[in-house]
Amino acid sequence: MISVAFYAPMKSPQHPNPSGDRQIARSIMAALTIAGFSPILASELRSLDIAGTDETQANLVKTAENLLPELVARGRRDKWQIWLTYHNYYKAPDLLGPAVSAALGIPYVQVESTRARKRLDGPWARFAAKAESAAEHADIIFYSTHRDAIALRDYAPKGQSLVHLHPFLDQSTLPKKSTRVGPILAAGMMRPGDKVESYRIIAKTLARCKSAWQLDIAGDGRARPEVESLMAPFGSRVRFLGQLEKSVMTKLYGTARFLFWPGYNEAIGMVYLEAQAAGLPVLAQNRPGLIDVLAPHLYYPSPEEGDEALATLLDTYWDNPSDPQPIQNYVQAKHLISAAAQTLQQALLPRLGIGS
């Protein structure tokens, strides 16, 4: 088996708190395994600096430097053949991979790296420079969205390979088609800022609708009182289900009429893929990142079209459920773990002189 040192500087796959980042990290490790690699968690160092404090960044850089000798020794002992880092960016740069891979003479690979040179000045200047340097050192960068690919291509050093790794679900088969007989489903954590803004757009949209819609909301968080206030005018037509386990969400997808989540400032949003795997259409706005995971044959209004366009679509989807098969076909072709494993295998093996 080909040993891959795996690292996620933003959040370890073993972190106790669930999140999209943790799930994606776990899914990448699973895809590597299916592709014939042996992923090993290299470190649980979390280099995340949310506030943009130079002292915090300096301390984390020092901590990382202290870890390097042990990591290099471990890599030699365990015969690491590739170092792969998930999600290198200016708030959580990879402070380990470039040095360790260089010392071991192995390929250095990144998944979902972003480049933001505008951050080289300001509160994250130190970390932005580290993130840029790490991206410069990468032999291969797998990107998830076309938006990320633009900057990656603009600044790519000679010899660096950029490969499109479609966002994917950690499953190899599709669930049964949704019966589409239940309420609309909205699913998102209730955090101040972008998440609440999506709920605000939902509330404005519902106020314009003419159909006999009903809505279930899956999610919770400290902004729940604000979300409840937004939905109060609709009374019993809106139900709050709280934060739900994956198995319960799967049941909801199996009966929901469609998913409604505008996606304000969402990076990708795995909930879209989960819903579409069950054949649910998605009511969302055409925003960068989202469009990379939404079935292309449906219409997604631009943010400039506002809640009126969303309301028109909502009434249409409620009264005229569409065929789920094309939506499932889209997920099957691009967004299951088998497709991801194939992409990883085809890009990584030639770097090791295998199959080239």
Image (tube, helix red, strand yellow):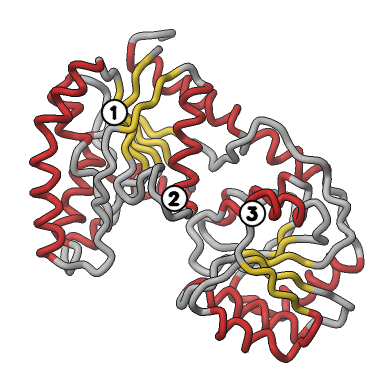
- The answer to which quarter of the image holds residue 100 is top left
Residue 237 seen: yes
Instruction: From the top left corner, tell me how far across and down residue 12 is, in percent.
Output: 36, 45
Q: Residue furthest bottom?
A: 233
Mark 3 / mark 2, whichever is N-terminal: 2
- Nearer the camera: disc 3 or disc 2: 2
Q: CA distance from mark 2 to mark 1?
A: 19 Å
Relative height, residue 319 to residue 174 (above, below): below
| Quarter assignment of residue 125 | bottom left
Q: Is residue 100 left or right of residue 80?
A: left
Splitting the image into 4 quarters, where does residue 74 fall?
Answer: top left
- Give the vertical position of 79 relative to 258 (above or below): above
Q: Is disc 1 surrounded by few (<14), some (14 to 19) or many (20+) residues within 10 Å?
A: many
Whichever of labels 2 and 1 marks the residue nearer the N terminus, that label is: 2
Q: Position of residue 210 (x, y in %)?
A: 86, 82
- Where disc 2 sits, the SS reads helix
Q: Residue at x 64, y 64 (%)?
A: 187
Task: Say what amino acid the circle numbered 3 marks.
Answer: Tyr
Residue designated by label 1: 83
Position of the N terminus, as image quadrant, is top left
Task: Check disc 2: other Cα within 10 Å, few if <14, some if 14-19, many if 20+.
Answer: some
Above or below, comparing residue 121 to residue 87 in the picture = below
Residue placed under numbered mark 2 in the picture: 21
